[in-house]
Amino acid sequence: MTEVGARGRSWGSKLLLAGLVLCVLFSVGYLGHAELTRKLRADYAREGQGSLTLYSEMTSGWLDRFRALTPIYARHPAVVEALRNPSNPDLIDGLNRDLEIWNAASGTADTYVMRIDGRTIAASNWAEKTSFVGKNFSFRPYFAEARDGRLGRFFGLGTTSGVRGYYFASPVRDGGTIIGVVVTKVAVEGLEQDFRQSRGQIFVTDAAGVIILAGNPLLVLKTLTPMSAADRRRISAAQQFDLSAIAPAPIAVREAPEGEDYEIVVAPADRAQAPETEFLHLSRTMPVEQWNLHLLMDTAPLRAELWTYTMLAAALAISAGMGVAMMVQRRRRLLERLRDRERAQAVLERRVEERTSELSHANVKLQEEVAERKAAEESLRRTQTELIQAGKLAALGQMSAALSHEFNQPLMAIRAYAENAIAFVDAGAGPQASENLSRVLRLTDRMGQLSKHLTRFARRSQDTVEPVSLDAALEETLSLLEGRIERAGASVVVPTETGIKVLGGQVRLQHVFMNLIGNALDATPPDRDPVISIRATCRGADVGVVVEDNGTGIAEDALPRIFDPFFTTKEVGKGIGLGLSISYNIIKDFGGTIRAENREEGGARFTLRLRAAEAGGQEAAE
């Protein structure tokens, strides 16, 4: 009875232990699943932010194509003369025909001219039933802005056509007096078609939360949030939209993680058969237009990846459990064998010497098994360490720069010049058409040079240290960054001492200069133009390169850690803290040093010390 009770207590203890182990495994699995979900969503959101940046620049570039038209039209003599003499039918008829030609050549939806009281005297659609001629649009905000001497901008439905469009308006001056307004309306179907080609769903909301542009037609002219009374009055006064037709957008928030810049929503699918799909929702402000650009990213790939990781973790857990069970079973067998030996030794004392020999042999085998197990565990630890290191290197190798926006502006300019050239040829203006085609050739040459620099920069370099021209490395770096420098309005002062050669690698040295110049552009506040100074001096076997900027400088508490991996002072999503760390190691591989400090007059200074090419070469890691 006592033996049965002991066995019962033993089984009860084992069941309790098994239950505790299962609870621990469930808790660990739940927390691990939650953390993995958060990390995968954060990585997915970073990818989406890159797409938002690209489409934000594309949308701004699309608007910039048409922004300059109305200021040009406003200075045309035919427009000024017609506004001076609005009762002259010959002038009005000529202007109507000119506006029709300009409108067709520029690709805009409508172009029209209004008097200072808002009444339209000429329009590109003068011959149509829905002509604007004689209609008064003074209630539109773009007219009031242009009448006050500014460039008018407005998005809304046409009161005559009922078609959405973006309006630009410019004042027409006669001397110093504003005598009228010229307006162009730009259709948005082409931009929405570009939105529809994206991986996710792109849409744009205005200040009132109305979806004015969308690749998915189901979202157009819907609201993300309830509209305020003030917004309703403003929209009604400007006749911007039909308020009775605007309904809430079919987008429901399912989850809004605290501290994250995204939310999980359910919305209509654009291309799929399913009526609703789960998306990761990101947004970005477009301050010039006072719009918000939104991106809905389908979470199906994210869920598939999470399911794969979950299955992998489950397989590993099962494998580990089986391994533990095998070890427990093996230990139990070993204990049983030892107990059998003890009983045999007690019963068969007379055979001590024979049994001692057998036990010695068994002990040797046991020691060999223990040694083999230790060797296997050590090999497993080394393999795990190598896998972790390989994972880190793979993560570092995944860094890339989306440079499509560097080609976007020249491509848009090429299209504009080509369209204008066609218009000039149709108008018989051969010299002007030739000049536009020459500009197209210069832009294609520029894009070819940029492509050549990118190809050479992307090619894997040799891991040897050899003589490198400092001038060539700086020239290629500035060529790669030319578009960004122009957009920032930056001034870059290059070294006056030329012909210096240092020991290093061409691509790796370019990498260092791109990091330093890029950080200098990022560190300059929006209210000042960046000024970047690069100086190079050669003193015997020592070459010094100094890169200075007029930015905000480096915080004193950040200076000691500025070259640490993953340390960054930039906002989330704008840097991962590896640029300066990689630059530090590249310069170290070259046998040089890099130092950071603040300038007394403001801004940061980075000083590089490199060996002159005459000092010889050595091997270095890439």
Image: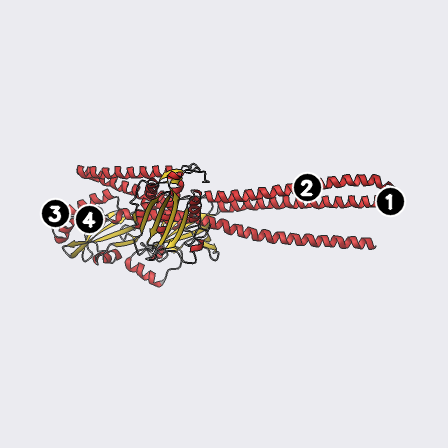
**Please, what secondary structure does the residue beneath circle 2 have?**
helix
- The quadrant the C terminus occupies is top left
Find disc 3 in the rendering and name its residue. Answer: 90
Disc number placed over residue 347 in the picture, else none: 1
Relative height, residue 616 to residue 49 (above, below): above
Q: Amino acid at mark 4?
A: Tyr
Q: Nearer the viewer, mark 1 or mark 2?
A: 2
Q: Nearer the viewer, mark 3 or mark 2?
A: 2
For marks 3 and 4, the one nearer the N-term is 4
Find disc 2 in the rendering and name its residue. Answer: 371
- Could you say where residue 21 lies in the image, as x and y percent from the top left? 66, 52
Viewer can see residue 618: yes
Q: Nearer the viewer, residue 518 or 189?
A: 518
For marks 2 and 4, the one nearer the N-term is 4
Q: Amino acid at mark 2?
A: Ala
Q: Nearer the viewer, mark 3 or mark 4?
A: 4
